[in-house]
Image (cartoon, rainbow, N blue to C red):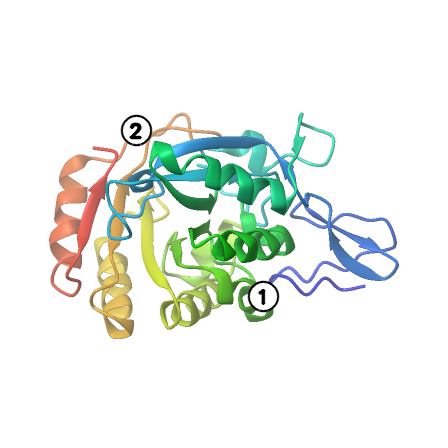
Amino acid sequence: MICPVCHHHCNLAEGQTGRCGARRCENGRSVSVNYGQVTALALDPIEKKPLYRFHPGTYILSVGSFGCNMDCPFCQNTQISQAREGDLDTRAISPEELAETALSLVPQGNIGAAFTYNEPMVGFEYVRDATRLIKEQDMQTAIVTNGCVSQAALHEVLPYADAFNVDLKCFTAAGYRRLGGDLDMVKAFIETAAKAAHVEVTTLVVPGISDSETELDAMARWLAALDPEIPYHITRFFPCRNMLAERPTDPALLYRMHDIAANYLRYVYLGNL
């Protein structure tokens, strides 16, 4: 069976798990093995996603599982993103229980639920089922994603998704291959999502990967061609995972990048400064 969820198209024998660690071949079908298996649950300020122009000043229940279909050397959540079934203690939370939990937190400022921390779209079935129930409670839904999944997977959740923050990690095909991703698939994800939901985009400025001002100029021009009001977050890298020997991004570079992006986009924000 060839898994259809992302660009890897993992060719899986019966019982074999794909590169993402979250999907397995069962009875000749690609199924989610992380469905409802929660590794992290927290009530966060919505700006932490980051979503700056989607219900600012509120809180959102953030939920994460395990698994990811990319392999970024600078990943800040590697303990769960690169985990496999059985590697971590998880709590089983059904879509119904998650919706009830989100509703119970309204008195604390909660407006809904955000699927984040690992790559939520490799387990899109849980995201789809939970967001549908949360929407039935008249609450908001958000998905923080690398955007590296098929249009079919995106359309499974799009009817119930109010907001996305998509990581646009760099802007070259070679750069994405280095990270285990696919630039064209991410661009298609952003373009489709922006037509149906609130979308914000984030680029972490990583030495040797996404620190080119010329490349950032191309990113900003491309985003502006979709919609110049798409909020764009340019964030500072700090040493992490396999890049512990690198220095944090020079703030002066981020300020220059902000000015470049602001030539095309109305809302540009700097983060981690």
Give the residue number, with chain letter if any, for mark 1.
Answer: 156
Which amino acid lies under the numbered mark 2 shown in the image of this protein?
Arg
- The image shows a total of numbered marks equal to 2
Residue at point 42%, 29% (across, down): 240
Point out residue 154 in the picture as x, y percentages from the top left corner: 53, 65
Tell me if residue 29 comes above or below residue 139 in the rendering.
below
Tell me if residue 70 comes above or below residue 85 in the rendering.
below
- Tell me whether the residue at label 2 lies in contact with that at label 1, contact meaning CB atoms closer than 8 angstroms: no
Point out residue 264 in the picture as x, y percentages from the top left corner: 16, 65
Q: Mark 2 falls on what kind of element? A: loop
Using the rendered image of the protein, determine whether residue 33 is visible from the camera's viewpoint.
Answer: yes
Report the mark closest to the observer, 2 or 1: 1
Residue at point 42%, 67% (across, down): 193
In the rendered view, does 76 fall on the left or right side of 212? right
Q: First in sequence, mark 2 or 1: give its number.
A: 1
Q: Which mark is residue 106?
A: none
Point out residue 23 in the picture as x, y percentages from the top left corner: 71, 50
Which amino acid lies under the numbered mark 1 shown in the image of this protein?
Glu
Give the residue number, with chain letter if any, for mark 2.
Answer: 247
Residue at point 72%, 36% (across, down): 85
Tell me if residue 83 comes above or below residue 192 in the rendering.
above
Q: Mark 1 falls on what kind of element? A: helix
Q: For the C terminus, which image quadrant?
A: top left
Disc 2: CA contacts within 10 A as few (<14), some (14-19) or many (>=20):
few
Tell me if residue 116 comes above or below residue 53 in the rendering.
above
